[in-house]
Amino acid sequence: MIPPYSRVAAIDDNDEHLKAIAWGLSQAGFCPLPFLFEDGDLASPPPEPVAGIRIIFTDIHMIGGNLDNHKVHAGIIIKCLKRIAASGPYALIFWSMFPADVEQMKKLIESDGPGAGLTTPIGYGAIDKNKVLGAGNPAEFNAQALRDLILEQMETFPTLATATQWEMRASEAAAKTTDTVFSLTQVRPAEERAKEWESLLAFLATEAVGKAIAAKNVDAALDSALLPILEDQLSFVGGGTTAQIADTHPLQVALSGSRPKRPKKISVARLNACYLVDEAGAASPKGEFERGMVIQLPGGFVNSGEFMRHFGREKSELLQKEFLCGVATPEQISMLPLHVVELGPECDHVQSKVSTHRYLLALLVPVALMELCQRESGGYHNDSVIDAGRIAFKGAPADEFHLLISTRCFMALAPGVSVGGKCKFRLRRMSIEEVVHRYTSHTRRPGVMRFNP
C-alpha cells in the first residue's frame, strides 16, 4: 500500500467536496494537499509542479455547461495535472458523482495529455462520490465509507507504493541528519538551545564554504555542510527494513524466476544517460563554470589563435594525436565536435574560491564512428583516454554517442573567462570521481630508468 503520511493531492471545484476528500485522506493516514478549482484555474496553484506527489484525486466535471463534453472536461484535468504533477510516476484517482464517465476520461487523458506536455499517469482508480456524499447533504456524509474506499484505492498500485517507500526512507535519512546535528546541543532552556543550534549551523556553514559565501547563500552552504552525514545515512537506507513484500507483488513475481531483463524499449545508452550524466544540469546558472559540465567548443573558438595556444594543434591534427586510431575523412571530422569537461578541484568549487578552471579535452563520438577511435584490441589511442559511457539523450534517444575524455590534454582559464561554448550536460558525481581517478593516476606515472640484460 502507499505508505502512511505520504502527500496526496486532491482537486475539486466544490469546496465542500474538497473538504470531504481532504478529511478522508487525513483519516486514512495521508497528508492531503487540497486544490480548489475556480474561475478556470486552481485557486492557489503551486509555483511549480510538486516533486514526490504520487497520488492525485480529481473531480471530473469542474466547469459548468454540457456534462457530455468530455474533451473539454479532460482538458481541464490535464491543465490541473500539469500544475501539480512533476515528471515522475503518479496514479490518478477520479473522485466524481458520474463514475460512468471515468473510462472516457482515461482515454482522453492518455490521447491528449502527451501533446499538452503532460506526463500521463501510470495507473487510474475511481471513487463514486454518491457512495459517501449522498445527494450532497452534509448530514449524509459517510466518513467511514470514504476512509475505506481511499484505503482500497491505495492498495491497487503496489509498484508505485514500493517506489514511494524508498523515497520516504531517503527522506528519513535527511531527517536523521538534522537530528544528529541537533543532538550536539546541550543547553537549557529551549530558547537558549535554539540559539545554540543556530550558532552551530552557522559555524558548520562557514566551515563548509567560508563566511563570505555562506552569507550569500545559507541554504547552499548548509547543503555542503550536512552532505557528509546525509551520504552516510543514505548508505544505510533500507538496511533495517524488515517488511516482507507479498509473493503476489509485481516486483516479487519478476524476481522469482530467471534473471530480469532490461526492458527492450529502454536502451543501454538511455540507462547510462540516466545514471552517469545529468541532462538537466546543462541549465545550471553557473554554466561553463559548473564542475563536471560538458561544453561543446564553439566553431569560432576551434582553430583560433587562443585554441592553438591552449592545445598547440589544429582540430584535425589534435583529433589524430589524441583520439583517432584510424584516418578520418574531412566529413567524418566534421561529425566529431570537440568538447571540454570542467574539472576544477572540488574543494575550490564548494567554497567558490576557484582560482583556475581546468577543462579536459573531450570528444562526443557517434556510435557509427567509434571504430575510428578504437584499436582492434578494443583499446583507445592512448592510456589517458577514458570512455565515460555510451549515452543517448532524451530529445533524440535513437542517436547514441560515446563521450571520450583525455586526461592529459586540457586548457586552463581564469575565473569568469568563458569560451562561449554550449553546455550540453553535466557528469554526475561518481562519473566525475572516475575521471578524477584516471586523471590523477595518469599524471602521477613515474618515469623509471630500468636496465635489462
Image: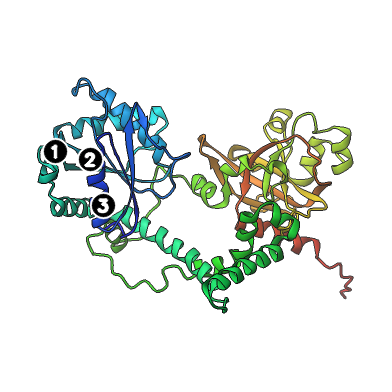
Closer to viewer: mark 2 or mark 3: 2
Q: Are marks 2 and 1 in contact (CB under 8 Å)?
A: yes
State the residue in front, 175 or 112: 175
Q: Percent x, y for residue 422?
A: 68, 35
Q: Percent x, y for residue 318?
A: 80, 41
At numbered mark 1, what does the secondary structure look like: helix, strand or loop? loop
Amino acid type, label 2: Glu
Q: Is residue 166 left or right of residue 226?
A: left
Q: Is residue 44 left or right of residue 442?
A: left
At numbered mark 2, what does the secondary structure look like: helix, strand or loop? helix
Crowding near the residue tagged with mark 2, few <14, some 14–19, many ≥20 C-alpha atoms within 10 Å: some
Vertical side of 430 occupied by 184: above or below: below
Where the N terminus falls, by quadrant?
Answer: bottom left
Crowding near the residue tagged with mark 3, few <14, some 14–19, many ≥20 C-alpha atoms within 10 Å: many
Which mark sits nearer the N-terminus, 3 or 1? 3
Amino acid type, label 1: Gly
Amino acid type, label 3: Leu
Residue under label 1, please give it. 136
* Residue that appears at 81% across and 46% down: 415
Give the label on residue 25, or none.
3
Vertical side of 83 occupied by 292: above or below: below
Which mark sits nearer the N-terminus, 2 or 1? 2
Residue under label 2, please give it. 16
Closer to viewer: mark 3 or mark 1: 1
Q: Percent x, y for residue 3?
A: 31, 59
- Give the quarter of the image for residue 10: top left
